[in-house]
Image (tube, helix red, strand yellow):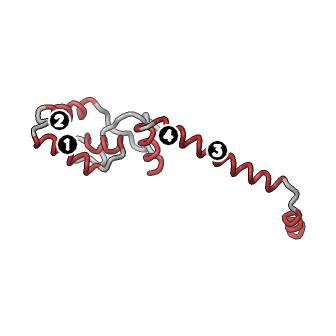
Amino acid sequence: MSGSRTKFYLDKQNEKFKGVCAGIADYTGIEVLWVRVAVVLLTVSGVGMPWVPLAYFLVAWMASAKPTGLYDTPEDAKFWQGVRTNPKRSTAEVRSKFRELDKRLADIETFYTSRNTQLASEIDSLR
């Protein structure tokens, strides 16, 4: 991995123009179509006319392109989007997964270390 997974990057693979909207979509987890529609509507409506294009070009100029291979799987990308939007919830999810894994491991350990005569007889019959 050559970059930080919590940093904003321009998404050059899914870009239409400079990759800013695709980068925002990747960073937040929002569908890129809705980000593009919001940018166009803000610009055309006049509410953000001088500021939206200016901010768009500033972000395109200042941000770096997303490194290739930043995420291993789509689930990995989804996890890091959650970390960026709500880090406390993400740490709670990780703790919960570890507790679940620990409980499952304890159940397996209990099963194999207890006196299981049926399992012992099956193993002896295979010898």
Circle 1 sits on which residue?
Answer: 39
Residue 46 appears left or right of 123: left
Residue 84 appears left or right of 105: left
Q: Residues within 10 Å of mark 4 (few under 14, many from 20)?
A: some
Q: Where residue 40 sits in the image (x, y, percent)?
A: 16, 45
Disc nearer the start of the sequence (3/4): 4
Label 4 with label 1: CB-CB less than 8 Å:
no
Q: Disc 3 marks which amino acid?
A: Arg
Q: CA distance from mark 3 to mark 4?
A: 14 Å
Q: CA distance from mark 2 to mark 4?
A: 31 Å
Disc nearer the start of the sequence (4/1): 1
Residue at image point 43% right, 46% down? 77
* Disc 3, SS: helix
Q: Where residue 99 sits in the image (x, y, percent)?
A: 64, 44
The C terminus - image quarter: bottom right
Q: Where residue 34 sits in the image (x, y, percent)?
A: 25, 49
Circle 3 sits on which residue?
Answer: 99
Q: Residues within 10 Å of mark 3 (few under 14, many from 20)?
A: few
Label 1 with label 2: CB-CB less than 8 Å:
yes
Q: Residues within 10 Å of mark 1 (few under 14, many from 20)?
A: some
Circle 2 sits on which residue?
Answer: 52
Disc nearer the start of the sequence (1/3): 1
* Disc 4, SS: helix
Disc nearer the start of the sequence (1/2): 1
Quarter occupied by residue 55: top left
**Which mark, by number, is residue 90?**
4
Quarter occupied by residue 53: top left
Q: CA distance from mark 4 to mark 1?
A: 29 Å
Q: CA distance from mark 1 to mark 3?
A: 42 Å
Q: Disc 2 marks which amino acid?
A: Val
